Every structure is written in structure tokens, then in C-alpha cells.
Image: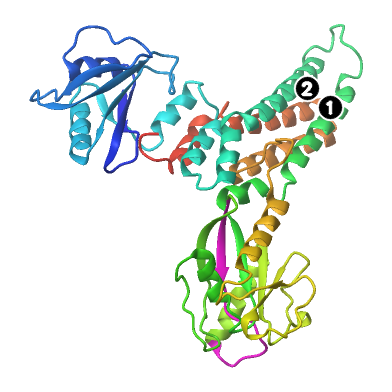
Amino acid sequence: MTIFALSSPPGKGGVAVFRVSGPAALNSYHVLTKRKKPLPPRKATYCRMMHPIDGGVIDRGLAVYFQAPASFTGEDVVEYYTHGGTAGVAAMLSALAACEGLRPAEAGEFTKRAVLNGKLDLTEAEAVGDMINAETEIQHQLAAAQYEGSLKQLYDGWTARLVQMLAYQEAEIEFPDEDMPDGIAEDLRPQIAELLADMRAHLDDARKGERLREGLQIVILGPPNAGKSSLLNALAARDVAIVSEMAGTTRDVIEAHLNLGGYAVTVTDTAGLRGETTDAIEKEGMARARQRAAAADLKVFLFDAAEGFDGGFFQEIDDGTLLVANKTDTAKDAKIPDGAIPLSVKTGDGLTFFLKRLTDELSQRWALPKDHAPLLTRQRHRDTLEESATALEQSLAAELPELAAEDLRLALRALGRLTGRVDVEALLDVIFRDFCIGK
């Protein structure tokens, strides 16, 4: 079946792009334009598009034909470029629906066909979605590297090594009477151990790729009335949290999603931390604050410069916490602890320096590897690699060559599911369900 969709963002725009993929794609051009002359591949052709039912003119634009298999999906693809008016887009979609053999595409179906036709593996296909959804420079760099095949090349290399190991293991089992070298299985053990070590090193990444892709968590902590909500509002450049002189105004966690130095971050304002309280709501707010602090990628501890700082009271402070002395405009003679960042959220004095320290801290902790080593970006990758690594461990512990070979097969199958070489159909709906229509 041939599918079609609007591949540019919906709504009013300068240009709208429509993609058609499948055996009837080229025929849609002849139906819409009433032209019999062949559409040349990979050349933009200026044409008038008309509705197949009433012949009404829709627009004048461009048509480009990508002949199979040299297309995104591996099928015949025709793309139409028209003006992006709302009514014109609706008319074009109606015209395509009226063409025989065409139906609207489901979410992610173009990329799904690219995988099924061998144009992309699953890691590259997932990167397409990440490229579309990337909101910061770091997210885009991470997605672009994966789309260029960084993970594919790594996993294909591991697959090739596993195939060779399994072939030798099977040869010793299947052809015992042939003139085979002695000790093949034993010679494989160092190779299996080396591959296992490579996998474990890849997995032992503190979930860096996943956190960068999903966004880092920054939690603002501190005693009541230290200015935490004001700081959140200053970072977000809008009133996210209610600000009041009354201590304990914030009872729940309040979040703002920001781009800090190219990093996607969620900054969380929390309830003020202090000693015992009889207020059940305040107690719950402090419990939630501590929960967020425990899961945070970076903590900012804010305190009133005039009140001073008592680090021993707060268990949430560690070596990686940024200490910030707020309200310096009203506490000019206060002694600021060494390493603390002086700040007045009210006047803005010190805010630029604080932002630099914050972004520098993110860069030091979460910079992409300088050696361009690929990072895991999804839990699916991690779970499948864990399965493969476990099978390798079992292979090393197996007492019989037949059991060792079966474990190598299990490891190979897991890698195949990771890239989409085996068991593809079972994964596709899950992987592509969050894609946008037209991609």
C-alpha cells in the first residue's frame, strides 16, 4: 500500500511538504498534474496540482521523485512542495486521499518502512525521532551522532565478533572427526571475556546518554524564605513560582524546563528545609524535597547571607552541591563561606556569575565524550545489552561446549534485537508509536 502525509509542521507556513511512499507514489503525480510525461528522478519539477475528483486547482509548486531504492524509505517516493496555507494543506491532503491506492500514513510509518527495507537500523531510526525532538545543542549533537551510525557501527562490530566466535564453537561441535585444531573452545574464552569487558564498559556510563537525551535534573534546596522561588523565576525569566515574604509559601515541587548552555534541564523549586514541624503539609513538602534531591543530577543550596550557613544541619549537601548566598543586597557585611556564590536575586547582582558557574558545572560533569565514544540513549538499549552480556557470562561458565554455543547464540540474538536484525516486528510498534505523523 502507498502512504502519504504532511511531513512539514502543521499550521500556517511558507512551504508545506507532502511525502508519498510506495508503488503508487509516481502515479499520484500523473493523477494530480494530469501530465503523462515521466517525472525525472531527483529533479525538482514545477507543476500545477489539481484535485482528482473535480479538477479544481490546488496550487502551483514542485514535485520531486526519488526512485527506489535510493530514497528514505527504500520505496518509490514523491514529495510535493506547495504554499503552506491552512486551506491549501487541507485541499492537498484531500487530493492525495482521492488518489487510487493511497492511504494516510500512521505515526512513524515512513521511518518504519526505512527499517524494514534496510535503509536504517533501529538505533538510527530512533535517532530520527531524537533529531526531531531535540531542543538543545547537546541533544542535537547526541542524536546526530547516533543518526550517523555511531551505535550501529559499535554494535555491528560486536555482532561480527560474536558471529566468528559462534562459528568456531559450532565447528568444534559439529565436525569432531574433521582435522580441526585442538582447544578451539578454550582459545575462544579470552575473546569472549574481551567482548564482555567492552560491553560492561559501555554499560557503565552512569546513564549519561539517557540523562542528556531526557534532560538533567537540577534541584534548588535551602531553608524557608531563602529566595528559592525567586531564583527559579529568575532562571526561567517568568513567574513560575509564587513569591512571598512569608516563610513556607512553597509546599510542593515546582518545575521549569530550560536550556542552560546547550543542556536540557528541569530546574525544581522545593519546599524549605528546617527542623521538626507539626504542619503535615509542610512535612510532606520537605519529604518531597529530599526525594528530589536524592535523584538530582545537580543540587543548588540557597541560603540567606544574613542568616549564615550551617552545613551540618542539611544531609542533602555533598561535594557536588553549589552553595549560593542570596540576599547579599541586605547583608553587605555578612561573611560568605569559602566557595559559596554571592547573589542577590532581587537586584540581579551576581546572577550572571551564578549562571556561568552553573553551566560550567554542567559542562564538567556532562560533556559529551571527546573521543566521540557512542552513548546509550534508551532503556531499551541498556536492557538488551544487559541480556547479551549476561549470556556471555553464562557462556564463559558453561561446562559443555554445546551449552557455551547456545549462550553465544542468545547473546547474538539480543544484539540483533538491538539493531533490528532479528525479531523486528515485535519492536516496531513500541519504538515508533511516539513518532510524529509524516516521519
Furthest residue toward bottom: 278
Disc 2 packing (10 Å; few <14; some 14–19; many ≥20): many
Decide: is 10 above or below 60: below
Find out whether residue 278 is within the magenta segment. yes
Residue visible at 63% across and 85% down? 330
Count of marks overlaid on the render:
2
Residue 261: percent from left, percent from top: 60, 52
Residue visible at 65% across and 80% down? 328
Residue 249: percent from left, percent from top: 51, 84
Residue 87: percent from left, percent from top: 18, 39
Q: Within the image, what quadrant is residue 312 found in?
A: bottom right
Disc 1 packing (10 Å; few <14; some 14–19; many ≥20): some
Residue 10: percent from left, percent from top: 30, 42
Q: Which residues are magenta?
A: 263-280
Q: Is residue 297 visible?
A: no
Residue that mark 2 sits on: 165
Residue that mark 1 sits on: 191
Residue visible at 73% across and 85% down? 334
Give the residue type that dot 1 points to. Gln
State left or right for residue 368 relative to residue 318.
left
Q: From the viewer's side, name the closer residue of 292 and 240.
A: 240
Decide: is 87 above or below 297: above
Q: Within the image, what quadrant is residue 184 found in?
A: top right
Q: Are marks 2 and 1 in contact (CB under 8 Å)?
A: yes
Q: From the viewer's side, name the closer residue of 258 and 344.
A: 344
Give the residue type that dot 2 points to. Met
